[in-house]
Image (spheres, grey):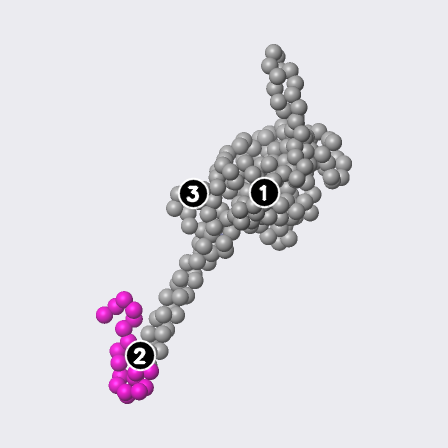
Amino acid sequence: MVKAPRRSRAFPAESEDFETDSYVHGQTLPASYDEDAYTQWFCAFLRSDLPSLTAGQQLGMRADLWRFVHPEIVTRTWSEGEYLPPVAILGDLQKVARDGIDAVRSGKWFSLERGIGYGIALFGDRLIRGSPTGSLEDQFRAVVMDTLQANWTRLAACPQCREMFLKLGKQKYCSPKCASRARSETFKARRKERDHHHEYVRRIQKKTGVKLKINPRGTK
Ligand SMILES: [Zn+2]
């Protein structure tokens, strides 16, 4: 069991000098908790095609994942001296969350496998609870459950790719990519319809020998 470094040291982004650097490495989560931003990040993490990420994007995602889980004490499973979870773990965690969501959707339980330990200690004259300890996977599960529970009614399936996203305002698709794909498909479908019309007119022309004027759709 290794204690994670204090956040101020662990995250250079909290020091202004390094703010730009953390963006270069692809980190996107704000340092202070924001429910919408964290939930959106979680949905984007689920949709990510991890093998196609660049080394810089992977580093950013590892840092974002650490920030999303905000573990205090993690029972380590990866190499010493490296506090960020290795890239191979991102795929495992993505699967953990996807399987959990599928379980919930099919009426089953999404649960903690081993659980999270905690302790109590004196803080002035009060007893406080803290020091949560557990594997990164279990701490991740716990945060994912909190995220799903708090936002379930705001989580929608993208009509284009079927992936989950946080529906904010009139947003219809998970990403600008899906929105533009949907737009271009509608455009193609409309063009196809117009071609059918053109073919129809040509068929009549051929059959009757009468030259018809082709009116583009929507005009007279
Ligand atoms: Zn989509």
In the depicted view, which residue is nearer to us: 31 or 109? 109
Please give the residue where the numbered disc 1 appears in the rendered image: 110
Residue 92 in sight from this viewpoint: yes
Please give the residue where the numbered disc 3 appears in the rendered image: 168
Amino acid type shown at disc 1: Phe
In the depicted view, which residue is nearer to us: 3 or 198? 3
- Tell me residue 174's x, y (percent): 48, 50
Position of 152 relative to 7 (above/below): below
Q: Crowding at label 2, few (<14), some or many (≥20) Cα neighbours within 10 Å?
A: some
Q: Crowding at label 1, few (<14), some or many (≥20) Cα neighbours within 10 Å?
A: some
| Residue occupying the point 65% across, 48% down | 91
Amino acid type shown at disc 3: Leu
Q: CA distance from mark 2 to mark 1?
A: 59 Å
Q: Secondary structure at mark 2?
A: helix
Quadrant showing the C terminus: bottom left
Q: CA distance from mark 2 to mark 3?
A: 45 Å
Queried whether the magenta region covers residue 62, the answer comes back as: no
| Residue occupying the point 54% across, 31% down | 32
Please give the residue where the numbered disc 2 appears in the rendered image: 201
In the shown orientation, is residue 7 left or right of residue 174? right
